[in-house]
Image (cartoon, rainbow, N blue to C red):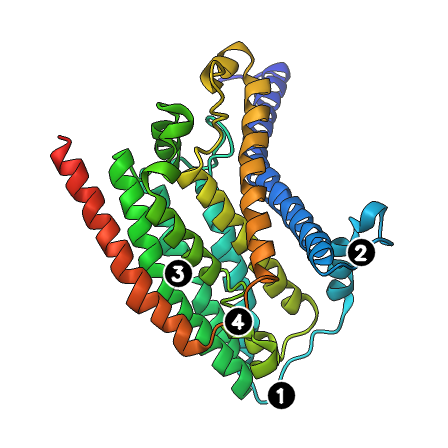
Amino acid sequence: MIIYATEVQTINSFLRLESLKEVYGLIWIFVPIFSLVLGIITGVLVIVWLEREISAGIQQRIGPEYAGPLGILQALADGTKLLFKEDLRPSRGNTPLFSIGPSIAVISILLSYSVIPFSNHLVLADLNIGIFLWIAISSVAPIGLLMSGYGSNNKYSFLGGLRAAAQAISYEIPLTLCVLSISLLSNSLSTVDIVEAQSKYGFWGWNLWRQPIGFIIFLISSLAECERLPFDLPEAEEELIAGYQTEYSGIKFGLFYVASYLNLLISSLFVTVLYLGGWNISIPYISMLELFEKDQIFGTTIGIFITLAKTYLFLFISIATRWTLPRLRMDQLLNLGWKFLLPISLGNLLLTTSFQLFSL
């Protein structure tokens, strides 16, 4: 069998073309992931700037103003400073645990963003168990904090890690029961289905009106999960110096800083998705579905804007709460979780189940 030179060149060029297609295919797989990560990082920088500006307004001071216009680059400057600072490690600590802890805290929270629908059909992974995936992954973050506290070989760090674990367990259960009530109303565990179930009835179809008790419990539990005042017991400065972060410096300290704001943003996004109708504008005579049918790009952009507007409204409430309420004691925090929120959330779930059964 004789193969001519032209045929060999044709075969080689075809193989090169196929390999290029595979490379482009791999690149396009990572494009949405990197876009989401970039958007999340930008969102965190905006939250840090907003918190400083709102805190300054509440306390009647100026706030950041020199790093960029209106001080908007202050968070970026702080991140750059932490990136170049020396990474110190405790000499008698457990180095593997000390190093892995911050990474576990950040990665577990970042994975939760994959099930958030920012607009119609704009979700990284529309899973049938999207809500439970978030609850399962968010339960891993306190393990990272506990590892950090134990690996630091410092009693304040270890106490902070134990407090973080106890707090997460106490408030995870009421939060999960509230999510179960929402999934019963929507007949689905998918975040996209939950938003679409609310969009059928417009503004009054939001789960905020159908589950007011669940909304309040979810609000309190998510604040506790984010370790925000008045629930910042794991890093109480007056008692534990900085809690599980005490021995950290440089980029690892920066990872904890980012993780706290990532957690706050994901909680706000889930409040928007579960209770505030997600990307739906809910204005009479204006349907988001009609906007998507007319111009998909414009409709998607409007959907993202609406989702973020609702999210940042909840963020404003979280930031204002920080400078309004005093810190609880540890016993008060655990009593609130186990003796009040857990029975009320169980009763709310029972009422929702009864209502769904009788409405069949």
Which label's residue is closer to the chain start, 1 or 3? 1
- Disc 3 is placed on an element classified as loop
Q: Please give the label number shown on residue 91.
A: 1
Q: Separation of disc 1 and disc 3 at Cα?
A: 30 Å
Which of discs 2 and 3 lies nearer the camera? The answer is 2
The residue where tag 2 is placed is 64
The reply to whether the C-beta atoms of the residues labelled 2 and 3 are less than 8 Å apart is no
Q: Residue furthest top?
A: 294
Q: Quadrant of residue 127?
A: top left
Which of discs 4 and 2 lies nearer the camera? The answer is 4
Q: Separation of disc 4 and disc 1 at Cα?
A: 33 Å
Q: In the rendered structure, which amino acid carries the disc numbered 4?
A: Arg
Q: Compared with residue 190, is residue 17 higher up or lower down, i.e. above or below?
A: above
Q: Compared with residue 257, is residue 265 higher up or lower down, i.e. above or below?
A: above
Which label's residue is closer to the chain start, 2 or 3? 2
Q: Please give the label number shown on residue 327.
A: 4
Which label's residue is closer to the chain start, 4 or 2? 2
Mark yes or no: residue 153 visible.
no
Residue 345: x, y in percent?
28, 55
Which of discs 4 and 1 lies nearer the camera? The answer is 4
- Disc 1 is placed on an element classified as loop
Viewer-proximal residue, 205 or 6?
A: 205
- The residue depicted at 49 percent of the width and 21 percent of the height is 283
